[in-house]
Amino acid sequence: MTYQIIIVLLIMIIIYILTVTLSYRKHKDVSEQFKASFCPGDCYGEAPGRERTAYITDNYEAMLYRLQMIARADKEICLSTFEIYDDDIGKDLMSALLLAAERGVRVTVMTDGINAFMELRGSNWFQAFASHKNITLLVYNQVNLLHPTRLQARLHDKYMIIDEQMYLLGGRNSNTLFLGDYKTRHNTDRELFVYLSEPNGDSSLNQLKEYFKTIIALPENAVFQCKVYTDQIKTCYQELLGREAHLKAAYPLAYTEPDWESKTVETNKITLLSNPIQPINKEPEIWYMLHQLMLTGEEITIHTPYIICGKEMYRDLNLLCKETKAVKIITNDPANGANPWGCTDYLNHKRQIRETGAQIYEYSSENSLHSKLIRIDDRISVVGSYNLDMRSTYIDTELMLVVDSRPLNAILTAEEAGTISYCRTMSEGGKIIEGENYDRKVIRGSKRIMYVLLRAVVIVLRRFL
């Protein structure tokens, strides 16, 4: 009897896993209607517009910008983040947002359902934060085991909007690996600050605000609430308010009046690209738009933490390399990457990636590369949350900002040379060339064993990584 029960349970588990995965097994294509609606030429502008931008590369500076922005909010703050923890940076962010709520600002924070299940649930800090009347803490696609087909879909957007004035968008998560200077070793990332010098209805700021309004209204979302205001939660609440002194000491510039004009460069046009927002198997709209946009250029550089392509993406990369003059892809050396799944899949598919015709640069330094950006010729820069993988293409929500700005592009071009100095690449003759700053690392010990085991596992799981 016990044996039969075990068999039944195993069958039920297998059926459940198949239910979670099978609806995503077949990759969709974008509709002809969507293809007709997108013209890459619309991302270009003829003259400088009202939106200005700053390129943020440093983790301390990234947190400084957030605090400067929050301190100047008058009416509303909208924050979307893939991951937020109650670590030091999470508490700093909650403290700044709570202080804004105390002065009457409406604060809406949205995070991914898996992150909420793992990090928010049971945290007194998040319950204390959510207890304020001016704060709404939302969970995208809340984990519901009775709806297994939705478990794959995740919110991968990372941005913050302040009133009708400004926003910040990129690839950073809200924890100590990406923000502040609590850690000596961290992830290297990129994001854009956008400032609207004059009110303008036709702006990327308004595009992002409309996107936020749409995604927070999804029926699969839930509100995270403080159900019982215990003494422990009350203590956390008071400690969050009391962190103001720490923030002012650690980030004194955040509480001085910033000159946004001098901190930013002009842009001709900024365009927001997004994936479908519903928690379902998606049409690859953002990849289609990025691919079409890259085909308008001659020299393309793609920065991505890892590369996990399906046959359709390989087809598009082959076409891109054929139709353009040069395509560079900068990604982590497998010994340097922070994502073991992505690094393992790269080891399995390195030859196939190179056969697309792209020049691959493997990055290795004291930190892991987490940047998601594309540079097209000397005008277009694209920064956001999209990784060159199947999850970002078909499963998750993703945002990328397309910026037509020669000054911004020049900054990215200058930075690119420094990044490549931390890379190794292969010449046409098959010779490995190492940059002067490349940190040669060897995969050994337990990490080597892990990669050997994962190389077999990822063959089955790669489209969901």
Image: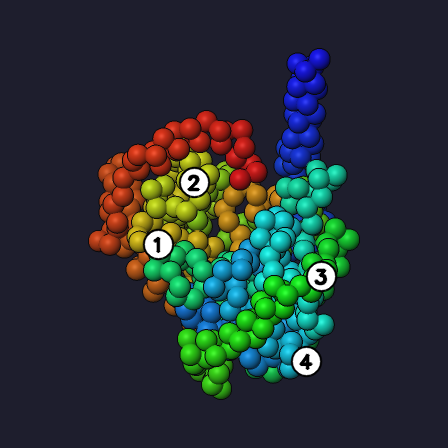
The residue carrying mark 4 is 104
Q: Earlier in the sequence, mark 3 or mark 4?
A: 4
What is the CA distance from the residue labelled 1 to the residue labelled 3? 41 Å
Q: Give the foreground label among 2 and 3.
A: 3
The local secondary structure at tag 1 comes to loop
What is the CA distance from the residue labelled 4 to the residue labelled 2? 44 Å
What is the CA distance from the residue labelled 2 to the residue labelled 1? 15 Å
Image position, residue 266 (x, y; %): 49, 76
Q: Earlier in the sequence, mark 2 or mark 3?
A: 3
Q: Amino acid at mark 2?
A: Pro
* Residue 228, label in figure: 3
Residue 411, image quadrant: bottom left
Q: Amino acid at mark 1?
A: Asn
The residue carrying mark 2 is 340
The local secondary structure at tag 2 comes to helix
What is the CA distance from the residue labelled 4 to the residue labelled 1? 39 Å
- Contact (Cβ within 8 Å) of mark 3 with mark 4: no
Kindly identify the residue that appears in the image at 39 percent across and 53 percent down. 369
Residue that lies at the very extreme toward the bottom in this rendered image: 257
Would residue 56 appear left or right of 110 to someone viewing this image? left
Q: Give the foreground label among 1 and 3.
A: 3
Number of dots carrying numbers: 4
* Residue 367, label in figure: 1
In this view, the residue in front, 313 or 259, is 259
